[in-house]
Image (cartoon, rainbow, N blue to C red):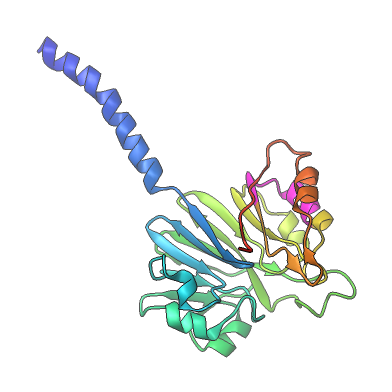
Amino acid sequence: MYLKSLLLALLLPALAASLFARLAKETKINFTPINHATFVIQADNKTIYVDPIGGVEAFSRFAAPDIILITHTHADHLSVETVKAVRTKKTVIISPQAVFDQLKLGTVLNNGEKTQVDSISIEAEPMYNTTKGRLQYHPKGKGNGYLLTIDGKRVYISGDTEETPEMRALKDIDYAFICMNLPYTMSVEQAASAVLEMKPKVVIPYHYRGPDGMSDLKKFQALVSKDKHIRVLLMDWYK
């Protein structure tokens, strides 16, 4: 009996550690940039394509999407041909009304609305321009940012937007994908200001190429570094 108890005492911590490691691996969220505004999320046994463009070849190393999220109708975010090529009969496509009108597929989710796909919660966040002279690029109500809750982690995808009051009010964000390219979205300073107020655990700059080249990510990092609790994660979006 003593020997059995001793063996259990020795084995249980190892078994617990093994189980914890396995669960941690199973619940890990992976983000893979494809190009500019297009990326893939793999988590909770789901594969999510965000604004898929570039043809089926761009996604050849990934499983077919369980979910496709589309933010708005601009060509660097919506490719009807790509969406139709990569989707399957089981794929859930979520978009604002303006995208649905072109795609003729999926489920409409407009600003402020929420849905659930299995264990994943999806909220449509406003994305729009606020600065005079830029308002025509992304009118309020026409496109979506998205807030996902995946296995307890909150992932914010800005879409094309400036630093709106709705963005600034977001709380408890684990990962924030933030755009910054003038004149279409926002400046580095605007993006950093919004991030410092939002306070995500990790911020990932994306969609940062504009007519005059790349936004200054070093400057963005320097501005955000005022808050030591926010990690800036740089990914290769423009291979």
| The N terminus - image quarter | top left
- Chief SS of the magenta region: helix
- On the image, the x and y values in percent for residue 48 come to 47, 65
Residue 202 to residue 85: above or below = above
Residue, far right: 132
Residue in the foreground of this view, choosing between 160 and 140: 160
Above or below, 75 against 184 in this view is below
Name the side, left or right, on which 75 lies relative to 13.
right
Residue 58 vs 198, above or below: the answer is below
Q: Quadrant of residue 4?
A: top left
Closer to the camera in the image, 208 or 92: 208
- Which residue appears at 52% of the width and 75% of the height? 94
**The C terminus: image quadrant:** bottom right
Expressed as whole percent of the image width and height from the top left, the position of residue 210 reads: 77, 69
Magenta-colored stretch includes residue 196: yes
Which percent across, then down, holds residue 93? Answer: 48, 76
Name above or below for residue 127 compared with residue 190.
below
Residue found at x 41% / y 48%: 27
Residues rendered magenta in the picture: 191-203
For the point 71% across and 49% down, which residue is it? 198
Numbered label tally:
0
> Which residue shows up at 75% across the image and 53% down it?
217
Q: Examine the structure image and report whether residue 207 is included in the region drawn in magenta.
A: no
To which quarter of the image does residue 157 belong? bottom right
| Left or right of residue 90, residue 78 in this image | right
For this orientation, the residue located farthest to the left is 1
Left or right: residue 157 versus residue 226 is left
Q: Position of residue 204 (x, y in %)?
A: 64, 53
**Which residue is outermost to the top?**
2
